Amino acid sequence: MKKILLFALCLVVSFTQAQNFDHIEFSNMIYAKGVNSVQLLPTGHLTGFPIIKLNSDEKLRLSFDDIETDSHYLKYTFIHCTHDWKPDGMNQIEYLDGFMEDEITESSYSLNTITSYVHYTLDFPSDMMRITRSGNYLLFVYDDTQDNPILTRRFMVIEPMQASIDASVHKASDVSLMYEYQEVDFVANTGGWSVRNPSQYLHATILQNGRWDKAISGLRYRSGKPGEYSFDYDDNSNIFAGGSEFRFFDIKSLKYNGGRVISSGLERGDNHAYIVEDQARPFGPYVSGTTACGGRYFKTEDYQGENREEYVNTHFTLRSDYDLGGGKIYVFGELTDWRILPEAEMKFSSALGAWETELFLKQGYYNYQYVFVADEGKNKEKTINETYIEGSHWETGNQYFILLYLQDESGAYDRLIGFKGIKVE
């Protein structure tokens, strides 16, 4: 027994002495070739926001497929972050109880699929590695050692005693932007939390849909009184382009054509699906619709049982009556991990007179949109423009998430004390 305890102690000491995460991004990233269909959701849900309550029974489930190899020895750990997703320098023993890393042991093989894959799942936190502080966390998955990163995912842990947030989304206060932009105003009641210096220690983040790249972070309260703080601005600090309702397609079946699929099935030994040709709509009127705010979920209606979903070469076509030069066009949404991916770039076909690309996607239901990234000379930061092709409307049914942070007075870390989700109806 003494030898086991000594080994565990040595493991903790060696692990905490070697905390160097310079080789990974503190964002949602995939590093290993062949890793697909990554999701991090509340356990038992098809969609959702990756947040759990501290010291509760709530868990998150990570799932992903590997279509390249089944020889991984997968491990994971958690890294505590600041409110704006930078490493805060805390030692892991300050926010983890138990081991500092653990193994991913749940895996299963696809069944009778054309593309074979290994499906991995991880439910956390576990009794082996408990989280002891609230805030932002990065889940880091690697193959045997941290020098071989597989993926990283952001998630949040919120305090059991929470601030209440009363929020609204409406037209931008700026009359020049009011028909294209949405403004997110809210009032935070901190309740039992003592905020001694709110101008320094209290700050908020607003997230539109799943896009961390356009999140507004570090917002300070504009007015208020002790215990009640207003984040109601009139200087455009809290506005977002409304965009348009996301486009969608349904490839849950390859035996019949789902929504907005014109053809699907087996071609030359591989699965293919062709999405209805899209039209650029930068100046079109607002068109209502019910979508999943850029999200997706995986499912097959062709067979029953686990791991029966096929992978499908999914073809996109975009036509435009407007000049789309001066940059590159990409398919974008949760289907691309909310990132600009080389394989999602649309290429112009002179034969078709339209742009086209294809993505390798797991069967399911998908939202997507087309975004524009201007040439580097005009756009050094490579800003993603979702309105250039899709247009923008204040009525669009976006989902917003508000996160309220209280910095520990010692400056050690940012607590997460408030959370609110609100959808434009």
Image (cartoon, grey):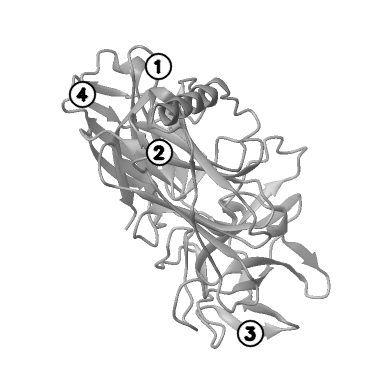
Give the numbered dot on residue 206: 2
Up-down: is 388 above or below 404? below
**Quarter of the image where the N terminus is located:** top left
Residue at 60%, 25% (x, y): give it. Answer: 20
Q: Is residue 90 above or below residue 298?
A: above
- Of the two numbered discs 1 and 2 on the same chain, state the one appearing first in sequence: 2
Q: Nearer the viewer, mark 2 or mark 4?
A: 4
The Cα–Cα distance between marks 1 and 4, rounded to whole angstroms, is: 17 Å
Q: Nearer the viewer, residue 286 or 351?
A: 351
- The spot of residue 408 in percent (x, y) is 33, 18
Say which amino acid is labelled 2: Ile
Which three-letter amino acid code belongs to the residue tagged 1?
A: Ala
Q: Residue 337 location in percent, x, y?
A: 56, 52
How many numbered marks, from 0 up? Answer: 4
Q: Amino acid at mark 4?
A: Trp
Q: Which residue lies under the disc numbered 1?
A: 412
User: Which one is earlier in the sequence, the residue at label 1 or at label 3?
Assistant: 3
Q: Nearer the viewer, residue 241 or 187?
A: 187
Q: CA distance from mark 1 to mark 2?
A: 23 Å
- The residue located at (34%, 54%) in the rendering is 424
How would you rate the neighbour count of disc 3 (Cα within 10 Å): few for under 14, some for 14-19, many for 20 or more? Answer: some
Query: Residue 58: x, y in percent?
Result: 29, 47
Q: Amino acid at mark 3?
A: Gly
Q: Is residue 126 left or right of residue 191?
A: right
| Residue under label 3 | 265
The residue pinned by badge 4 equals 193
Per the model, the C-alpha gap separating discs 3 and 2 is 41 Å
Give SS at disc 4.
Answer: loop
Figure check: 179 above or below 195: below
Helix or strand or loop: what does disc 1 sit on? loop
Q: Residue 131, located in which quarter of the rendered image?
A: top left
